[in-house]
Image (cartoon, grey):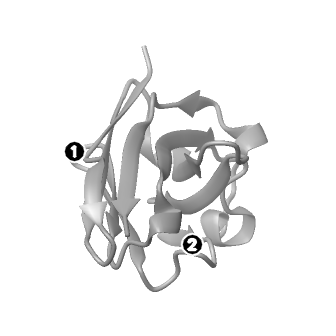
Amino acid sequence: EVQLVESGGGLVQAGGALRLSCTITGLVFDDYAIMWFRQAPGKEREGVSCVYSRDGSTYYADAVKGRFTISSDHAKNMVYLQMNNLKPEDTAAYYCAAEKTPRPTVKFCALYGPRPGEVEYWGQGTQVTVSS
């Protein structure tokens, strides 16, 4: 059974930092791009970041560039999202997701970014609230 389990959300003041973790089980880590989406109340789900460990590519939405950093730990099958200088507009439920990548791939995340319609597995989400 494939599971993606997020953790690390919480309440933080503007300017603060949080690190989200996604624990992945049941799939071959190198066969999937792992990405983070977020959804605020009344808004559509948006892609935040993506990492593909096989080719080392990453992607960041413009709204988070320079503040968020995505990383992966192949040995632990975990993906992290370090979020610094948080803003109230970052308040949302954050979801970890996995998309299976075709072969061959070159800089998959950089080329395609997070594509919600192509996601095969979703986590249950973790809430991030940033107070002003």
Q: Image quarter for residue 50?
A: bottom right
**In the image, which is nearer the foreground, mark 2 or mark 1?**
2
Name the one closer to the observer, 87 or 68: 87
Type of amino acid under label 2: Tyr
Residue density around tag 2, few if under 14, some if 14–19, many if 20 or more, within 10 Å? many
Q: Quadrant of the N terminus?
A: top left
Inspect this view and state whether residue 55 appears: no
Q: Nearer the viewer, residue 26 or 43?
A: 43
Q: Which mark is residue 76?
A: 1
Q: Is residue 28 above or below residue 65?
A: above
Residue at screen point 41% across, 80% down: 67
SS for dot 2: strand
Q: Which residue is mark 2?
A: 60
Q: Is residue 29 left or right of residue 19?
A: right
Judge by depth and name the residue closer to the eye, 41 or 102.
41
* Residue in front for this viewpoint, 103 or 25: 25
Q: Residue at x 63, y 56 (%)?
A: 47
Q: Residue 99 in the image: state x and y as whole percent.
A: 62, 42
Q: Work out which residue is located at the far top of the displayed protein and give it.
A: 1
Image coords of residue 35 (percent x, y): 53, 52
Sequence order check: which comes first, mark 2 or mark 1? 2
Question: At which x and y percent is residue 31?
Answer: 53, 43
Callout 1, which amino acid? Lys
Q: Residue furthest left?
A: 76
Q: Could you say which disc has been placed on residue 63 in the image?
A: none
Q: Residue furthest bottom?
A: 66
Residue 125 image offset from top left, x and y in percent: 44, 35
Residue furthest to the right in view is: 117
Local crowd size for mark 1, using a 10 Å CA cut-off: few (<14), some (14–19), many (≥20): few
Q: Is residue 19 left or right of residue 120?
A: left
For this view, does 59 lie left or right of residue 15?
A: right
Q: How far is the residue under mark 2 from the one under mark 1?
A: 23 Å
